[in-house]
Image: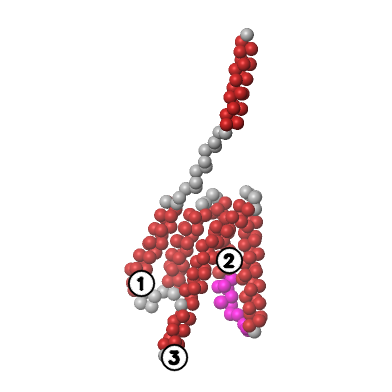
């Protein structure tokens, strides 16, 4: 009985990564929408995207600098950091910031948020997989890569293409209804104009 409980607990721990992955999916899923709303909310067509990006940087500082700094301090962790680890992490931060800025530029160029983010989320896993394999090649060579892997990459690219091609259009603006008062006003103006023309002809 104890062995079964221990095994169940280990299985739960082994699946914790999935919860964190789903958390990231949710956060990144609404990231583009919130970023687009933030740029529009600045009410500055020319520099609104840059102002929004500034606040993204502030948020990065709070969540990616202050939070881990406090965590390291209160956890009593050592401050030894290798050059390789620091360099890769620094470059990762720059690449992430460039990506966030690219999203804003795409929105500023009239890209639809649903299409922009679909292309990003379809293309990013493909780039990630190819770069990861290039950095850490398979032990048995590229020929050992499963055909399903390449099929998955093709489906991701196709998905991004289809979303871009078949995205739903915006709702049509309702036709302006002419009220009775407006109709009466237009009719009186027409009758007045006709009377003036009759006077002029006399």
Structure colour scheme: secondary structure
Q: Which residue is mark 2?
A: 94
Q: Residue 145 bears which disc, if any?
A: 1
Q: Which residue is mark 3?
A: 2
Where does residue 13 sit, x and y in percent of width and height? 48, 81
- Of the pair 99 and 68, the residue shown nearer to us: 68
- Of the pair 180 and 105, the residue shown nearer to us: 180
Query: How many residues crowd mark 1 within 10 Å: few (<14), some (14–19), many (20+)?
Result: few
Residue 49 within the segment the image draws in magenta: no
Where does residue 92 sit, x and y in percent of width and height? 55, 69
What is the C-alpha distance between the residues marked 1 and 3? Answer: 40 Å
Q: Secondary structure at mark 2?
A: helix
Residue range (magenta): 77-91
Q: Residue at x 60, y 80 (%)?
A: 81
Q: Is residue 176 above or below residue 96?
A: above
What is the C-alpha distance between the residues marked 2 and 1? Answer: 31 Å
Disc 2 and disc 1 in contact, CB within 8 angstroms:
no
What is the C-alpha distance between the residues marked 3 and 2? Answer: 48 Å
Q: Splitting the image into 4 quarters, where does residue 70 fall? A: bottom right
Q: Is residue 75 above or below residue 33?
A: below
Residue 102 visible, this angle: no
């Amino acid at each position: 009985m104890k062995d079964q409980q221990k095994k169940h607990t280990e299985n739960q721990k082994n699946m914790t990564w999935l919860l964190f992955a789903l958390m990231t999916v949710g956060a990144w899923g609404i990231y583009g929408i919130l970023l687009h709303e933030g740029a529009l909310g600045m009410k500055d067509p020319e520099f609104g995207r840059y102002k929004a990006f500034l606040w993204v940087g502030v948020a990065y500082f709070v969540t990616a600098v202050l939070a881990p700094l406090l965590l390291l301090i209160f956890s009593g962790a050592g401050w030894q950091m290798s050059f390789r680890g620091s360099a890769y992490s620094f470059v990762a931060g720059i690449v992430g910031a460039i990506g966030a800025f690219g999203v804003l530029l795409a929105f500023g160029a009239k890209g639809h948020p649903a299409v922009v983010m679909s292309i990003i989320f379809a293309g990013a896993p493909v780039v990630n997989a190819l770069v990861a394999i290039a950095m850490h090649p398979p032990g048995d060579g590229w020929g050992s890569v499963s055909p399903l892997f390449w099929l998955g990459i093709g489906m991701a690219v196709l998905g991004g293409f289809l979303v871009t091609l078949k995205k739903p259009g915006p709702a049509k603006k309702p036709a302006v209804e002419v009220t009775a008062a407006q109709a009466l006003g237009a009719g009186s103006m027409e009758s007045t104009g006709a009377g003036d023309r009759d006077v002029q002809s006399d």
